Image (spheres, rainbow, N blue to C red):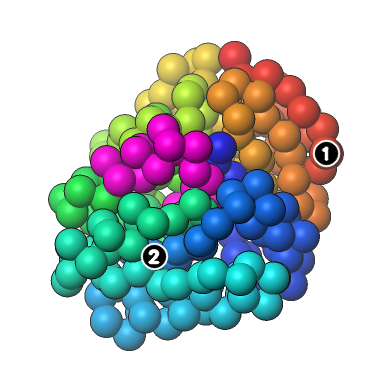
Amino acid sequence: MICLQGGGEFSPGCRAMDLDLVHRAGGRVVVTALAGEQGHDYDTATANGVRHFRAVGAGDVIGAPDAREDRDGALDAVAGARLLVLPGGSPSRLLHALRTTGMADAVGHLLDEGGVVMGASAGAMVLCPWTVLPDKRAGGALAVEPGLGLVANALVVPHWSGGSSRGDWIRSVEAAVPAATTVLGIPEESGVLVEGTLLTAVGTAATHLLHEGRDVAPGETWRLS
């Protein structure tokens, strides 16, 4: 089970959505903010996540060591997780960190064992087969590169508030990914719960399906093509 969130993580509007994840996971919550820079950025974002999930009502919440500095400690922390939280930041930095530290395999193993993964903004983007990398360009467009592929046939456009605010993203995505890819425009404090090919909109606002040109209201469920 994966929850793709559009951003604004750890805000009051996310509490109901995140409490549901805590209940579904039924065990330890582990936060690792690898989309942030090492040091203060990582420590602050991870601590914010720990504080949020404790306020939500999770009884067992820890921040993992930064895998770029303590690989074994981070992998041990993830091995004990039932809910793994990947906050936002730089998708390029996050993807590189996950792939070079063994954390990508650890995330996949957690899912295989029935655990839950929540990714917000960059954290949601890299879990899909394709991700936009806003800090990189290819041929004048934003770079779109393979992600971890833990969610089938999807791409996340986070912080969604309408097409005009993401025109450069949409043009880059349409030029780079297969036409059958489900492109999810997910607003802040909102998300999509993925259970195999079954998707459910959650949070405070509707998710926009770009290729279908329609909104999916919180609580509505549909099938991933």
Q: Is residue 224 above or below residue 125?
A: above
Task: Determine if the magenta segment contains residue 113.
Answer: yes
Residue at the location (64% across, 57% down)? 22
Decide if residue 64 is on the left or right side of residue 223: left
Mark found first going from the N terminus, 1 or 2: 2
Q: Is residue 137 left or right of residue 26?
A: left
Amino acid type at circle 1 is Gly
Q: Position of residue 130 (x, y in %)?
A: 39, 33
Q: Which residues are magenta?
A: 105-123
Q: Which residue is mark 1?
A: 219
Q: Identify residue type, mark 2.
A: Thr
Note whether 165 is above or below 59 in the view shown: above
* Residue 2 horizontal side relative to residue 113, left or right: right
Q: Position of residue 1 (x, y in %)?
A: 56, 37
Q: Nearer the viewer, residue 71 or 122?
A: 71
| Viewer can see residue 153 | yes
Q: Position of residue 89 (x, y in %)?
A: 42, 64
Nearer to us in this view, 33 or 36? 33
Callout 2: SS: loop
On screen, residue 75 versus residue 144, left or right, reads left
Instruction: Rate crowding at label 2 as few (under 14), some (14 to 19) or many (20 or more) other CA atoms within 10 Å.
Output: many
Q: Dividing the picture into quarters, in which one does residue 34 lie?
A: bottom left
User: What residue is at 47 percent from the left and 24 percent from the top?
Assistant: 152
Look at the numbered discs 1 and 2 and tell me whether their residues touch, using CB distance below 8 Å.
Answer: no
State whether residue 80 is above or below residue 49: above
Residue depicted at x 46% and y 80%? 47
Q: Nearer the viewer, residue 110 or 171?
A: 110
Whole-number angstrom distance, CA of label 1 to CA of label 2: 28 Å
User: Which SS class for mark 1?
Assistant: loop
Q: Which residue is mark 2?
A: 32
Q: Which of the pair 197/125 is nearer the observer?
A: 197
